[in-house]
Image (spheres, helix red, strand yellow):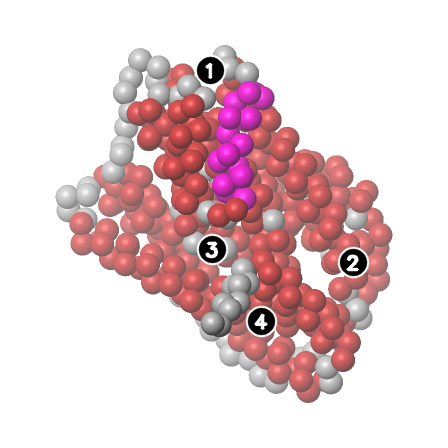
Amino acid sequence: MKTKLPRIGLLGRVVIAIALGIGAGYIFPDWIARIFATVNTLFSSFLGFIIPLLILGFVAPAIADIGKRAGSMLLVTVLVAYAMTFCSGIISYLTGATVFPKILANAANFGSQLAADAPDLTPKPFFSIDITPMMTVTTALVFAFVLGFACAIRPDTTATLKRLLDDFRTVIQLMIEKVIVPLLPLYIFGIFMSMTAAGTVGPILVTFIKIIAVIFVLHVGILVLQYAIASLFSGRNPFRCLWTMMPAYATALGTQSSAATIPVTLERTIKMGVRKDVAGFVIPLCATIHMSGSTLKIVACALALMIVHGMPYDIGMFAGFIAMLGITIVAAPGVPGGAIMASLGLLSSILGFSDADNAMMIALYIAMDSFGTACNITGDGAIAQIIDRIFANKKA
């Protein structure tokens, strides 16, 4: 009887790719390194082409779907979820801006010293193909709003368009699941191989470890804050409510999926005392639109990389980035790596990230994917408490 080997998950494949990439950077001759650099250049061009389509494919049908449940409870739930997502991003920025310059000082100094030499040492691709995107990230976002809004307010006359958007979302999901995600380890392998050859991998690895530690603490702090705010509405003990939600948190850690955790999140939310009809409305909706944990991670990782590379940043820049991010990653939790993929266009257009920076963001995000998902879904319970109190005399 043959023993079936366990399947290695995406995180495991990324870790292996990083380790192999670092080793290859020391031993590969230039011509082999240039082959992988060529592959990375082609993959990067394809990513640049697909990102606006990804935003269109996620956001437009998500807005159309939300519009089916139009009403005051929907509007308030969306506003509360977006406010929590935005505030989580701002708290992440303020914490990072205070802490990261101190704990990443050595990495930043080392990175600055090597920055001038890195371009000369990085393997060059044999050739490149420029795949021009069909639209910019901003155009894709606005176009998605136009189409989604039309489907939401006139579902009777836009049924064909809605089906088209749903089919297009399926195409984008398949592209991510069957093409982009399987190729990510190879892409990250090439990035770390190039960074090792250029001598910049040292500060990056130090950054990895320190960022992960800070983000874990931030997740705990954000959840405590969200339930403390919810307690002002519900009058319940926030720590007791958090303890009640721990099975949902643990389930999210294991499944890495907000959607797969909905049954547990729903059951735990009702156990906290939220009415069944309110919980049944808020929890599935927030699994799609509430992204506090994911936003927290993306903002912290982006800020840390900017500090290491000596890139300029300020609160205005990140406030705009967070505001756009909270909209762009709507509906992304349903796709593996969807949130970070949807954010790549904003990272490049607003923060000025390079392809290598985006690859680092992907690796960092995937390394903490479970914790971000767990933070997202656990925070849904706090939102449900707020909505339950606001609409105490109404039914969902």
Question: Distance between the Cα atoms at labels 4 and 1?
Answer: 49 Å
Q: Which residue lies at the image location 38% right of the left edge and 63% below the top edge?
A: 174
Crowding at label 4, few (<14), some or many (≥20) Cα neighbours within 10 Å? some
Query: Circle 4 sits in a helix, a strand or a loop, which is it?
Result: helix
Vertical relation: 315 (above or below) 239: below
Question: Distance between the Cα atoms at labels 4 and 2?
Answer: 22 Å
Marks 4 and 1 close (CB-CB < 8 Å): no
Where is residue 351? Give x, y as percent: 61, 52
Marks 3 and 2 close (CB-CB < 8 Å): no
Task: Give whichever of discs 4 and 2 has the lower sequence position.
Answer: 4
**Residue type marked 4:** Leu
Q: Which residue lies at the image location 43% right of the left edge and 27% below the top edge?
A: 269
Please name the residue that numbered disc 3 is placed on.
336
Q: Which residue lies at the image location 53% right of the left edge and 37% below the top edge?
A: 249
Where is residue 213? Give x, y as percent: 71, 43
Compare residues 75 and 169 and report the one nearer the observer. 169
Marks 4 and 3 close (CB-CB < 8 Å): no
**Residue type marked 2:** Pro
**Residue type marked 3:** Pro
Is 239 part of what is drawn in magenta?
yes
* Most common secondary structure along the magenta stretch: helix
Compare residues 197 and 112 and report the one nearer the observer. 197
Q: Dividing the image into 4 quarters, which one contains the C terminus?
A: top left
Crowding at label 2, few (<14), some or many (≥20) Cα neighbours within 10 Å? many
Point out which mark residue 234 bears.
1
The residue range painted magenta reads 238-253
Mark closer to the observer (3, 2): 3
